[in-house]
Amino acid sequence: MTVAEIVGIYGAIIATILAIKEIYLILTNLRVSYSFSYKYASDGFGNQIGLGEFVLVLEIVNRGKTKRIISSLKLKLPKKTYDFDLISIVSPDEYPITLNEGEIFRKEVNLSQLLNVIKDCRVNDSDNIKFYFQDTLGKKYFTKGIKIKTIKEFTVTKINGN
């Protein structure tokens, strides 16, 4: 084998590795997370009025190199029921949303409204629910499971004002 052949093979291997890395960066998933946050009621000028409430904050981050378009936010229940479309509950006219590289989108979900929606679905306190954003390509990006009991505890804390 000549030096030219060795250099050619080495160059081909490096080019393949870099191509795979670039494809990975382009196709990297969106990341979804959630947290509970206390939100105060305000008068529109930033002044707190009355008691606040806990909300569930859903966050999606575009960690890829390409623009993604989010078409919906949905709720996945543990039982064999339909997934709920949360667009009508939390954001009636907000979708679709375009996420460019590195952008973050946050959505707050009122816990009382959420519990009212799922109360007739025969879910137990020990059941987990998941939220997911769906993009225009049909790919779903799920949160980790959230126990119904945890949501109820945050709602009770709001009601009692503790």
Image (spheres, rainbow, N blue to C red):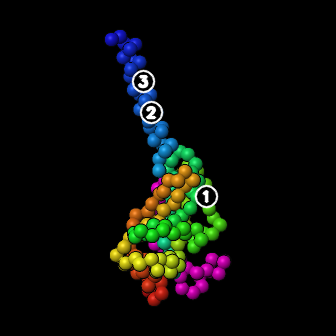
Residue 141 visible in the picture: yes
**Residue sitting at 42 percent across and 23 percent down?**
11
Q: Is residue 34 visible?
A: no
- Gap in Å between the C-alphas at discs 2 and 3? 10 Å
Quarter of the image containing the C terminus?
A: bottom left
Secondary structure of residue under mark 1: strand
Q: Find disc 3 in the rendering and name its residue.
A: 12
Check the image and report above or below for 83 versus 13: below
Q: Position of residue 134 (x, y in %)?
A: 52, 58
Badge 1 crowding class, 10 Å Cα cut-off, few under 14, some 14 to 19, many 20 or more, is some
Q: Which residue is mark 1?
A: 97
**Residue 34 belongs to the span the image colors magenta:** yes
List x then y, in percent, for residue 33. 45, 62
Q: Position of residue 3 (x, y in %)?
A: 36, 12
Which amino acid, by three-letter code, is at mark 1? Ile
Residue at image coords 54%, 85% = 51
First in sequence, mark 3 or 1: give its number. 3
Which of disc 3 and disc 2 is earlier in sequence?
3
Q: Residues within 10 Å of mark 2 (few under 14, many from 20)?
A: few
Quarter of the view holding residue 143: bottom left
Q: Of the numbered discs in the image, which one, if any, rests on residue 18? A: 2
Closer to the chain start, of discs 1 and 2, is: 2
**Spot occupied by residue 25 in the image (x, y as percentages of width and height):** 48, 42
Residues shaded magenta: 30-52
> Label 3 amino acid?
Ala
Residue at the image position 65 percent from the left and 66 percent from the top: 93
| In front of the other: 2 or 123 | 123
Give, as a three-letter code, the residue at label 2: Leu
| Marks 3,1: beta carbons within 8 A | no
Extreme-bottom residue of the structure = 160
From the viewer's perspective, is 56 left or right of 4?
A: right
